[in-house]
Image: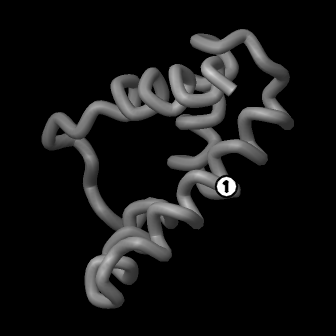
Amino acid sequence: MSNIKTEIAGLVTKKVKIPQAQAEMAVDVVLEFVKKKLPPNVAGQFDAILEGNVDLSDGIGLDDAAGLLGGLLKNK
């Protein structure tokens, strides 16, 4: 799992209080779903972000993304 996915899974674990392994599986499922919905050229950029090949220091909030994902998981 890439550093970005691990970071998101860690945030989900913390916010939703589920085991890290469960959070990692959920993150993988959600990211694959999102990737399939993106246009092919954007999906490649998405992969680059997940692989850590894009600088995210410009303020993209992984904490916000994890909170949203956590909210979705909690409602299931």
Q: Residue furthest bottom?
A: 40
- Seen from the viewer's position, the closer of residues 22 and 53 is 22
**Image spot of residue 23 (x, y percent):** 73, 34
Disc 1, SS: helix
Report whether 13 appears left or right of 39.
right
Q: Residue furthest left?
A: 58
Color encoding of the figure = one colour
- Circle 1 is placed at which residue position? 28
**Image spot of residue 47 (x, y percent):** 45, 73
**Image spot of residue 35 (x, y percent):** 46, 70
Q: Amino acid under label 1?
A: Asp
At a point 30% along the width and 83% down the height, the residue shown is: 39
Residue 2, compared with residue 45, is above or below; it is above
Q: Quadrant of the N terminus?
A: bottom right
Q: Kindly indicate the quadrant of the structure image that contains residue 60.
A: top left
- Seen from the viewer's position, the closer of residues 59 and 33 is 33
At a point 27% along the width and 48% down the height, the residue shown is: 56
Report whether 75 appears left or right of 63.
right
